[in-house]
Amino acid sequence: MKIIGYHRAATPTEQDLLHEYGGCKSLAAAVIHKAISDLFKMHNGEVVGMNNASYKAGMAIDYMEAKNFLTMKSGAWSKTRKIWCAMADIDEKSLMGYVYRTMERFDDEG
């Protein structure tokens, strides 16, 4: 069954994705950086840009997705983080350590 030029196939493995998209190191690093930014904009109470209800709701969704992406220890979010970290050549355990330490610091300051 063809769908817009693509064929139905098994889910690609992490190695398949790394092989196909291995040259996207800066893109992968930008995705991780955006997740960190989304997490800490809300985590420390910072509000930027428009201050209306729908903007805040969008920020809350971004925050939850970033938090799941950066902190989940198993499941789809964890697997996704592993792939993005591998593509960006970022040590996943170091990233998670940084995120947890920063979250604790913001909690202590808040």
Image (cartoon, rainbow, N blue to C red):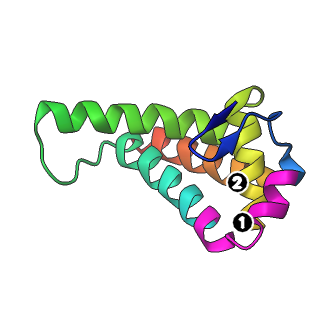
Q: Quadrant of residue 8?
A: top right
Q: Residues within 10 Å of mark 1 (few under 14, many from 20)?
A: many
**Residue range of the region highlighted in magenta in the rendering:** 16-28
Q: Judging from the image, what secondary structure is the residue with disc 2 in?
A: helix
Q: Residue at x 77, y 47 (%)?
A: 82
Q: Is residue 34 visible?
A: yes
Mark 1 near mark 2, Cβ–Cβ under 8 Å? yes
Which quadrant is the N terminus positioned in? top right
* Left or right position of 45 against 52: right
Image x and y of residue 66, in percent: 51, 41
| Residue on which disc 1 sits | 88
Q: Which residue is at the front of the view, 6 or 103? A: 6
* Magenta portion: prevailing SS class: helix
State the quadrant of the C terminus. top left
Q: Could you tell me residue 60's position as x and y percent?
A: 34, 32
Could you tell me the amino acid type at mark 1?
Answer: Ala
Q: Residue 93: x, y in percent?
A: 80, 50
**Is 100 on the left-hand or right-hand side of 9?**
left
Badge 2 amino acid? Trp
Query: Dot 2 corresponds to which residue?
Result: 84
Q: Which residue is found at the position 66% from the left and 36% from the top?
A: 2
x and y, in percent, of residue 79 in the image: 76, 38
Q: Looking at the image, is 96 positioned above or below residue 86?
A: above
Q: Is residue 91 visible?
A: no
Q: Residue furthest top?
A: 75
Q: Is residue 49 left or right of residue 35?
A: left
Q: Say which residue appears at 48% left-offset and 56% top-offset.
A: 34
